Amino acid sequence: MKIFSRFLILAAVFIAFWLGLAEVNWMQMFRVEEATDSMEEKLTEIVKESIERSEEIIKDKEITSVIDSIVHKIAKKNYIDEDRLNVLIVQNSQVNAFALPDNHLVIYTGLINACDNPEALSGVIAHEMAHIQLNHVMKKLVKEVGISVLFSMTSNGGGEVLREVSRTLTSSAYDRSLEEEADQKALLYLLNANIDPRPLADFFYQLSLEEPDFASKLGWLSTHPDSKERAEKIINDLENQMKQFKPVLSEQSWKSLQENIEKRKETL
């Protein structure tokens, strides 16, 4: 009798479960997801158009191939779909890099010049890749702007308000919790790829020292506060690590990259 009663209960739960699924508007859910993808594409399109109007997107293979090799190394060792990542290298003296919706990563030449070594640059790239993989860009926009406003703006054109969103994407900070999450994920990415994270800590600390004199140039610092504290956390997290790290690039490749960036700056 007990077995039969249990069977009836299980059958009732099973039926209730399937009836519940039947009530879900799957087509509506798919439409929302499709609309969200379209919104991300539109937002990225607006930001790219804004960048192209005022700056130059570098397509020189001698530069892009080196950056792509860093992205490839991080992506491969962390099972990230590299084909979905879109990296844009922009001729701009500001020390900055930022993630956009729709899996786009923007790197300014000023950041490349500011890094003392490829490991520091790799750390910043890993951090921005973490923002992308953790969907922080849209979380930030939804919190600051609101999903209904974003849908309305992208479907109706949006005008100046949409451009204000693009400025938010490129110049305002993430919540502290999102930054900490991206830091932790970036550290994991670097360790998995056998890239030394300590130069990233050095880079954070260097930015914190230079902030008073170079605030207008340090875009990445303004969007990623508490650099000294974050440098210390990276060092503390690595305290018990006995990992053997490998160079990201050869000395010649790194030197050539910075020389090619410098040459482009001189021709402007």
Image (spheres, rainbow, N blue to C red):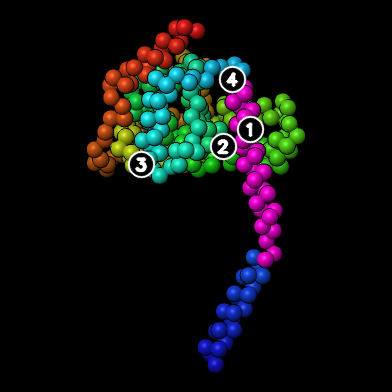
Q: Mark 1 touching mark 2, by CB under 8 A?
A: yes
Closer to the chain start, of discs 2 and 4, is: 4
**Residue picked out by circle 3:** 77
Residue density around tag 3, few if under 14, some if 14–19, many if 20 or more, within 10 Å: some
Question: Which residue does the image show at 48% across and 23% down from the upper left?
Answer: 89
Q: Which residue was labeled with disc 1?
A: 43
Task: For mark 3, give the secondary structure.
Answer: helix
The alpha-carbon separation of the residues under discs 4 and 1 comes to 14 Å
Q: Which mark is residue 52?
A: 4
Q: Earlier in the sequence, mark 2 or mark 3?
A: 3
Q: Position of residue 166 (x, y in %)?
A: 62, 28
Q: In 3D space, how far apart are the residues under numbered discs 4 and 3 (Cα atoms)?
A: 32 Å
Three-letter amino acid code at disc 1? Leu
Residue positioned 40% across, 17% down in the render: 113
Q: Amino acid at mark 4?
A: Glu
Q: Is residue 36 magenta?
A: yes
Precedes in sequence: disc 3 or disc 1: 1
First in sequence: mark 4 vs mark 3: 4
Q: Main secondary structure of the magenta part?
A: helix
Q: CA distance from mark 3 to mark 1?
A: 30 Å
Compared across the picture, whether 59 is left or right of 171 comes to: left
* SS class, disc 4: helix
Looking at the image, do the residues carrying marks 2 and 4 touch, with CB atoms under 8 Å apart? no
Residue 156 is situated, as x and y percent measured from the top left of the image, at: 75, 34
Quadrant position of the N terminus in the picture:
bottom right
**Mark 3: which amino acid?**
Lys
* Classed neighbour count for the residue bearing mark 4: other residues with Cα under 10 Å, few (<14), some (14–19), many (≥20): few
Dot 1 lies on which element?
helix
Residue that appears at 57% across and 36% down: 101
Disc 2 to disc 3, how far (Cα)? Answer: 22 Å
